[in-house]
């Protein structure tokens, strides 16, 4: 399915009935990273899973893909689907976007799941690294980005024992355009610090993190929990940064428990 929002094509999956769940994917992947969650939840919830601008089958723009821009895209997409309020489930970059969405459209958020993400902005060194990575994507293509990122995206256990997961992630990364990858890196480099926002969150929050996540390690998740009143935290043992596809059963169980406990 496709929608035209804010001058760009957003390709999305929309299936099922009930409380709407909007899944926001990580960098530099696409919406198929949520396939296990869609399969597990579509019989009980409405699952909306977009390819974010610059990724998958969605359109690409040259400008940096700012988190506010992604949030504005998602707001328009929800509007076009007739959805007033959704549970936002974001992993890593998807988590940055969930925070930007909550900052801009709090009335549209029923609850949030922040997986393998952080609230802080980039330090100057990390920011520089992103700008260099954006140039590398443009110069050398998506395969070079896959080579560089896969060892960091996946946990030690997955890297050592699950070649099929490595292959799946590689396929997703390599299918993206270098322009989309570069725009996303430049957009993430600009993202503001959202720690102030955590103290103002008034909806239920579940924080998930893989025990082997080295990009946004468990101590980042704990820091988010400390600032967010009422948030709960679950560590997914044996998973790295892509906890939802490294340990889907454990991830889904924690997610389902949280969703089932949401007040009406
Ligand atoms: C992601 O998984 O979305 C990325 O690791 C986010 C980032 O580069 O900060």
Image (cartoon, rainbow, N blue to C red):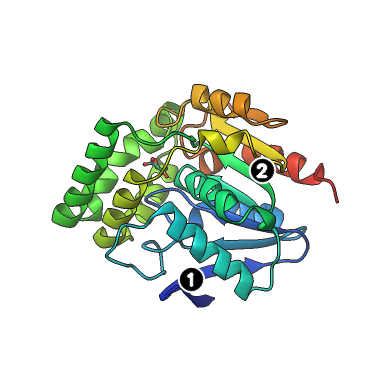
Residue 41, located in which quarter of the rendered image? bottom right
Q: Position of residue 188 (x, y in %)?
A: 36, 47
Which numbered dot is residue 200? none
Residue 206 horizontal side relative to residue 170, left or right = right
Residue 185 horizontal side relative to residue 8, left or right = left
Residue 118 horizontal side relative to residue 257, left or right = left
**Rendered-image quadrant of the N terminus:** bottom right
Q: Report how many numbered discs are placed on residues in the image.
A: 2
Of residue 69 and residue 155, the one placed in the foreground of this image is 69
Residue in the picture at 49% in, 49% down = 94
**In the image, the residue with mark 2 has its CB under 8 Å from the nearest atom of ligand 1:** no
* Residue bearing the label numbered 2: 252
* Residue bearing the label numbered 1: 11
Residue 133, located in which quarter of the rendered image? top left
- Which of the marked residues, 2 or 1, is nearer the chain's N terminus? 1
Q: Are marks 2 and 1 in contact (CB under 8 Å)?
A: no
Residue in the picture at 57% in, 39% down = 197
- The local secondary structure at tag 1 comes to strand
Q: Quadrant of ligand 1?
A: top left
Residue 115 visible at all: yes
Residue in the picture at 35% in, 35% down = 122
Residue in the picture at 37% in, 71% down = 59
Outermost residue, left direction?
Answer: 139
Q: Position of residue 256 (x, y in %)?
A: 73, 44
């Amino acid at each position: 399915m496709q929608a035209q929002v804010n001058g760009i094509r957003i390709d999305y999956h929309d299936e099922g009935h009930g409380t709407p769940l909007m899944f926001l994917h990580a960098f530099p992947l696409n919406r198929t990273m949520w396939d296990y969650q869609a399969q597990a939840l579509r019989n009980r919830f409405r699952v909306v899973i977009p390819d974010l601008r610059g990724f998958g089958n969605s359109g690409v723009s040259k400008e940096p893909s700012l988190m506010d821009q992604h949030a504005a895209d998602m707001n328009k997409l929800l509007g076009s689907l007739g959805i007033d309020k959704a549970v936002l489930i974001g992993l890593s970059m998807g988590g940055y976007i969930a925070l930007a969405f909550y900052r801009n459209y709090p009335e549209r958020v029923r609850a949030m799941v922040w997986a393998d993400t952080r609230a802080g902005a980039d330090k100057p060194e990390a920011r520089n690294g992103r700008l260099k990575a954006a140039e590398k994507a443009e110069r050398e293509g998506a395969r070079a980005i896959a080579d560089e990122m896969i060892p960091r995206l996946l946990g030690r256990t997955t890297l050592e024992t699950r070649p099929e997961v490595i292959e799946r992630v590689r396929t997703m990364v390599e299918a993206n355009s270098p322009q989309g990858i570069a725009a996303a890196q430049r957009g993430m480099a600009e993202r503001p610090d959202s720690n102030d926002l955590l103290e103002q969150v008034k909806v239920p929050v579940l924080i998930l993190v893989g025990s082997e996540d080295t990009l946004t390690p468990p101590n980042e998740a704990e820091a988010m929990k400390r600032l967010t009143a009422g948030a709960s935290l679950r560590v997914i043992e044996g998973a790295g940064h892509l906890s939802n596809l490294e340990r889907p059963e454990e991830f889904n169980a924690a997610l389902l428990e949280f969703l089932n406990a949401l007040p009406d």
